[in-house]
Image (tube, rainbow, N blue to C red):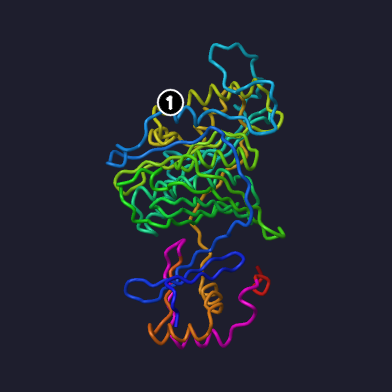
Amino acid sequence: MVTSCALLLQLSMALFTLIPSMGSRYRFALAFQVTPSSSSFVRHPSSSSRSYSPTNYLQKQYKSSAAVERSTFRRVRGTSTSTSTWMTSDDESSQPVPSSPTATTDLTAYQNPNNLDDQVFSAMSSDGGLKVTVATIRNLLNDMMIQHTMNPVPGDAIGRSTLCALMASNGMQEEQMFQLSMKGEGPLRGCVVIVTGKGEARGFVGNPSLGDDFTLREAVGTGTVQVVKNHPDWPRPYNGITAIRHGDIDRDVGIYLAESEQRSCALAAATSFNGILCTAAGGYLVERLPDCSPETMSHMERNLARLVEMDGGDALPTNLLLDGKTPLDIASVLLDGLGMEPLGSVLPKAFCECSDEKLMRSLRLLPRKEVDVILQEEGKIEARCQFCGKVYRMGPEEVENRLSEAQGDPSKDEDFGL
């Protein structure tokens, strides 16, 4: 007999949970994720954003200088100590920043009228000192909310997490993966997002039905930000972890990037809802690259301040997206006067790796006696993927045939070509 209410089955790249559920005493919930095995604690940058529609949830959103904070940079360890901050006043005289004209650059391929398509657009300043990544994922977020029957608060959490993961991982190889986990103690019960270099994304929250009684910060709670990066050719994944200090996800991810990965950045990500429909979901990531000059930094700070003024709220950059501004438009504002060299554009989309084969692999990790008990009591095996919500069902005869024909050690990835 299976005596526990939750049985964890962990592979090197997968985590499966056997849990009871309504209508069926036993139900498989599949969650394919990497578990961090090491930690590194990080400090504080200044980036991010927030948002929401006119509901009770909106009334509880904090009103502060967060938008300004999220549009400025903080020094990371090991940078020059010649100045105490990179933020400069508008009346401070500075040398003009040399930039190459972008009029000859064909930007047709990067246009996205009215943000009809999801897009992650990246560009670099002409002097190579700054990289800008801007994303919009309204369609992707609505798909995720439909898959998991999410309310707006959990939708805001997974939307911000997906935006941060897509922007932070921009430029990595197609087969590489980036996993962002918000392991908070709040009623949201955590949020996990996995993206690939091709823009494929999947994710879930612990409590998708959480209502508007909580703000996002209250829903996330205290805990840790955990990041895992992996590549098929790497001997082991890269792990990083830091504390959740704000609970609004994007600022916490900005802290992680600056402290754990030494990526000096300004990061913002937010969503906007009309009822349960996402009307805008977007963000930007501005990264200072090696040898970026003080003049270029000062110019970028002024461009960021201008962007905050254009948006006019604490929901950077959702107001701009609602006004029809595209990732290309936002990047043009951020790189105004610095020259813009497009790096590329990615179409993010929902994609899940769950399959019958992975279900059978997890099933083989259970003692055969327990599998027989489940089949005897339930008459079938029922599994639900936590990432996409797809339900798998197998009858006793199918399970028996698959188990008898199965080959390889289910606990070893190499036996399955992974």
Q: Quadrant of the C terminus?
A: bottom right
Q: Residue at x 58, y 60 (%)?
A: 34
Start-end of magenta stretch: 386-412
State the image coordinates of residue 375 (x, y, percent, origin top left): 43, 85
Q: Residues within 10 Å of mark 1 (few under 14, many from 20)?
A: some
Q: Residue at x 65, y 51 (%)?
A: 173
State the image coordinates of residue 13 (x, y, percent, origin top left): 60, 64
Residue 194 on the magenta span: no
Q: Which residue, given by chain and number where applicable, does mark 1 sit on?
A: 310
Residue 394 on the magenta span: yes
State the image coordinates of residue 384 (x, y, percent, origin top left): 43, 69
Three-letter code for the amino acid on which mark 1 is drawn: Met
Q: Is residue 154 above or below residue 73?
A: below
In terms of secondary structure, where does tag 1 sit? helix
Residue that lies at the very extreme toward the front in this rendered image: 3
Q: Quadrant of residue 124?
A: top right
